[in-house]
Image (cartoon, grey):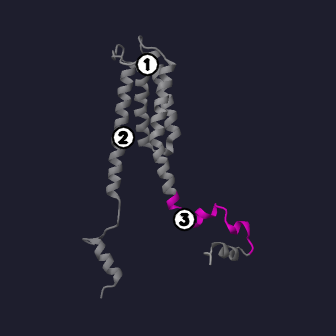
Amino acid sequence: MLSALNCAAIDRSVNGFLMRPSRSGLKWVKLVFQTLVWATFFVAMAGMSWAALVENLSIPTYVPQQDKLSHLAGFFVLGALLAMGLGHRFYWWALSFCFALSIGVELAQHFLTITREFSLEDAAASALGGFIGLSLFCLPLWIAALIAEKRSRPASRARSHSLTIEALLPVQAGRFRRRLMSPPR
């Protein structure tokens, strides 16, 4: 006769191989998403570098300070892509990368082109765009990680940090607790 354990093992096996529950489908989705995010990041960085270093790029101006808005929007996209690619754990590294890139683009404009010049306002707008994009996309990831950590924490460990009756009254705490926690008669 087959025992319950053998039946369960037979049910999970296919052609003699034990089928383990896996998340390989989710791993592939995550891998494809990460690849698309990084590819988009590098294409966006290449496009922004080209736009920053081309000599005579004529962009029609519709609003005053459109140059600053384009810097802010471009680096917002880069910050958002960095947040999606790296996650919330590398926030400070990604933020420092955005700041260094914003200064680097302006220095490259100053030293590598004749018609373009260094502008501290452009660098500040770029850094602000990177900060906003990175922060807006890292904040939900950080909150989700905190919620997941709290859910995975055992209840006894979660309660050990709170102030309890046992901590206040170590002697005969059980009797006091039963009296305080019991429903009124």
Quadrant of the snapshot with the C terminus: bottom right
The answer to whether 164 is drawn above or below residue 123 in the figure is: below
Disc 3: CA contacts within 10 A as few (<14), some (14-19) or many (>=20): few
In percent of width and height, residue 54 lies at 36, 17
| Residue designated by label 1 | 65
- Amino acid type indicated by mark 3: Pro
To which residue does mark 3 refer?
154
Which numbered disc flags the more N-terminal residue, 2 or 3? 2
Describe residue 143's horizontal placement relative to residue 15 as left or right. Answer: right
Give the mark toward the camera: 2 or 3.
3
* Quarter that holds the N terminus: bottom left
Query: What is the span of residues highlighted in magenta in the rendered image?
Result: 150-171
Q: Which is in the foreground here, disc 3 or disc 1?
A: 1
Q: Disc 3 versus disc 1: distance between alpha carbons?
A: 54 Å
* Res 37 visible: yes
Check if mark 2's residue and mark 3's residue have beta carbons within 8 Å: no
Q: Nearer the viewer, residue 86 or 140?
A: 140
Q: Amino acid at mark 2?
A: Val
Q: Earlier in the sequence, mark 3 or mark 1?
A: 1
Helix, strand or loop status at disc 3 = loop
Extreme residue toward the front, this view: 185
What secondary structure is marked by label 2? helix
Which residue does the numbered mark 2 point to in the structure image? 37
User: SS at mark 1?
Assistant: loop
x, y (%) of residue 68? 44, 22
